[in-house]
Amino acid sequence: MNYIVVVLSIAVLFIFILIISVLRRYKRCPSDRVLVVYGKVGKGVDKLSRSAKCIHGGAAFIWPVIQDYAFLDLTPHSIEVNLTNALSRQNIRVDVPSRFTIGISTEPGVMENAAERLLGQSKEQIHNLALDIIFGQLRLVVATMDIEEINNNRDKFLSNVSSNVEAELKKVGLKLINVNLTDIRDESGYIEALGKEAAAKAINDAKKSVAEKNRDGAIGEAIALQDQRVKVSEADATAVEGENLAKITIANSDALRRQREAEAEKMAIASEKVQAARALEEAYVAEKEAEESRANREKATKYADIVIPAQIDKEKVEINAEAEAEQKRRVAKGEADAIFLKLDAEARGVMEVLTKQAKGFKDLVAASGNDPKNAAMLLIADKLNELVELQAKAISNIKIDKVTVWDGGNNADGKNATSNFLSGMYKSVPPLEDIFNMAGLQLPEYLRGKSLEEARDIMEDKTSDGSENTNEEKS
């Protein structure tokens, strides 16, 4: 167990040391430096091995053993160049004091030149290298130009110097940042003589210009005096003419003024009258509007006192009428529902009675041996007593004691008038056959011409016989 713990501790320690080492080999490049990784850095675009890999504004992992790194400082260097006795194209020696500002380039391709030629060198060594390059190129540019061109066209001179110097500086990985020319002098005084010539020419041109201007001034003054006299005479004549015209104009103006004053006074009087009439009219209109306003106010007051309460009462009546109508409608609906329920109950009762009667008729026909005639006989026998009672009631209300019969003795048939009266009255009761016919039925043959009592007896006998026969059949 202790052996395993020791092994794990060693492994963890090894991994920790490995991570620390890896992190320490990861290098970041500041913005004011160029990171140069040298050693085995792979091949370039041309498939050739590179001597170094330059990184500006990034980071890179430096493999141990096979790679290492260094930094190039991008801080600009100011170099004072005091070029003396440089021959121009006219073989005139000139002095060109100037100051150049250079720095290590961050352009791809140029940085590799700086890594190859400047890595490990001090600032002084870089300064001296750049100074030699600048001296040589500056002498070359001076030798290709005339003194006049150098002195007068400074921009062209600076452009030539910058292009030549920068092209040579790129070869060692440097960049030209700025060029300042302080002054240009020559030992023979040619440039100074050119200056004096230019100054004398400028002075002479100025004197000539002054004389010409003075001449032009004198001529102009004479012409101006001549014009002045002419203009004064013309002005005097014009002034006299103007005075006369002014007098005429004044007279016309006075006449016009008086006319206008008269018209204005007339218009003022008319306007005053019109304004007075308008004021009076406006007063009438204001009084009329006041009266109308007062009448409208009184009308509104009466409307509020009479019409509004009447409308409120009308609305109350309408509301009460609507409420009463709604109440009646509800009552009518309730009554209609009650009537509907009552009629529905009665219909259900009638339906139940008819259903029971139909069932009873069916049972009656079955009890009569499925013979409808026997079933009818049973029904007639059941209702025969009621028929007899109805026939008896036909003459039951006759007051016999109130009937007066004039009896003249016996007739030829041996009956007197009283007996004939009673017999006829009894015969006025419709016989049993007529009753059946009025009911839409047909009386059996064995009952025709029989009285009600005889028919009843016969029906009872028939019924009893039919029932016996039926019972025998069922047996």
Image (cartoon, helix red, strand yellow):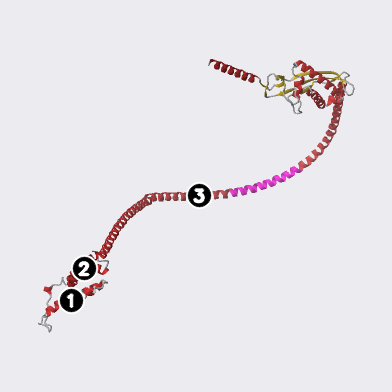
Q: Within 10 Å of the Cα at label 2, are there few (<14), some (14-19), or many (20+) other Cα atoms?
A: some
| Span colored in magenta | 241-267
Q: Assign a secondary structure to mark 3.
A: helix
Which of the 4 image quadrants contains residue 183?
Answer: top right
The front one of 355 and 129 is 355
Q: Could you tell me which residue is drawn at 82 percent across and 35 percent down? A: 224
- Label whose residue precedes the other's in the sequence (1 or 3): 3
Residue at image position (14%, 78%) is 421
Q: Residue furthest bottom?
A: 412
Task: Estimate how packed mark 1 is, as few (under 14), some (14 to 19) or many (20 or more) residues with alpha carbons within 10 Å.
Answer: few
The kind of secondary structure element at disc 1 is helix
Extreme residue in the right direction: 91
Q: Nearer the viewer, mark 3 or mark 2?
A: 2
Furthest toward the front, the residue is 475
Residue denoted by label 1: 427
Q: Is residue 118 above or below residue 244?
A: above
Residue 209 appears at what percent x and percent y? 85, 29
Q: Which residue is mark 2?
A: 463
Residue 221: x %, y % from top left: 83, 33
Query: Which amino acid lies under the numbered mark 2 shown in the image of this protein?
Result: Thr
- Measuring from the top left, give residue 13's x and y in whole percent: 59, 17
